Amino acid sequence: MGKTYGEWLVRWRYPVLIFFTLAAILAASGARFLTFKTDYRVFFSDDNPQLQAFEELQNTYTKTDNVLFVLAPRDGNVFSRETLASVVGLTEAAWQIPYSIRVDSISNYQHTEAEDDDLTVDDLVSDVERLDAAGLRRIRDIALNEPLIANRLISDRGHVTGVNVTIQLPDDGTGKEVPEITAFARQLVEEVQAANPDLDVYLTGMVVMNNSFPEVMLHDQRTLVPMMFAVVLVTLILLLRSVSATLGTFLVIVFSIVTGMGLAGWMGVALTPPSASSPTIILTLAVADCVHVLISFLHAMRRGLDKNSAMIDSLRINLQPISS
């Protein structure tokens, strides 16, 4: 069968080349429909019992998607006027994050105090500019001994604190919500650090984690994939010692990748963090198949066969392995 197919392919090589080139271009045009899912739910099937239980919990109460700002003053003391002022400012600004429904920090923690028969409920931190040393010690003592915020929004040593923003993502989102939220949060980080250079601000949380997947994928596509192409091509030139064979392999790699990704777009397949490595996997398989065919082809030519006969013999030998 391999020999028959090889004879047919060699005979009609030019029409076949034109046909598959046009088919690859048509398939590649579907890449414009590719989308990327950042939701961790893509790792579970719809009937997964753990996922169903988790969604029932969220539907009963609220979603737990969040953005967490971690503030670490370089002097190791959260309870200074400068740092507390940054916490208060960030807490107020964080309400403007798209889809935010709640902001929690030590500054807006509702502390209750009793005086005789009266109960006073107020933000733990207010009027930062008017706080004296005694006021700062009072806030520190309350925060580090309050079970609702100690080791949650403030570390046990009072050297790191957090501002947690609860996010309510729409159920029928377009996929642009997570990047929008992350971009807004990063802008807030820059503003806080610009206002207080002695404060390090870190960004984490479920929303930020979901956004990191496509960012890392795009970074790899711009850096690692071109590097892999270069390494593969240099290696092929050294091993095959043929510019035309290397060029042919390069074209097979490119057509294979654009066809595969384009067909995924036409079929409505959304990319996920694991499937984003598809170009690398396709590249590996394309190189392996081409090397099999080319090694047999060049070996046959060294035995005295002409190009057509050598290619037919190579396809006879390798058609079954590379088709498996």
Image (cartoon, grey):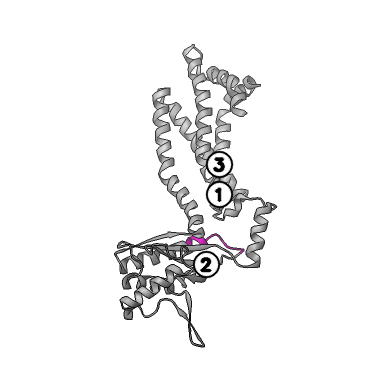
Tell us which disc is closer to us: 2 or 1.
2
211 w.r.t. 79: above or below: above
- Picture disc at residue 124: none
Q: Report how far apart the C-alphas of labels 3 and 1 lie in the structure.
A: 18 Å
Q: Position of residue 49 (x, y in %)?
A: 69, 53
Horizontally, residue 132 falls left or right of residue 125, namely: left
Magenta-span inclusion, residue 173: yes
Give, as a single range, the part of the protein colored magenta: 171-179
Q: Which residue is under mark 2?
A: 166
Q: Which residue is under mark 1?
A: 272
Is disc 2 surrounded by few (<14), some (14 to 19) or many (20+) residues within 10 Å? many
Q: Main secondary structure of the magenta part?
A: loop
- Residue placed most toward the observer, 188 or 151: 151
Q: Report how far apart the C-alphas of labels 2 and 1 lie in the structure.
A: 24 Å
The amino acid on which the numbered mark 3 sits, given as a three-letter code, is: Thr
Instruction: Please count the marks in the image.
Output: 3
Q: Dot 2: what SS?
A: strand
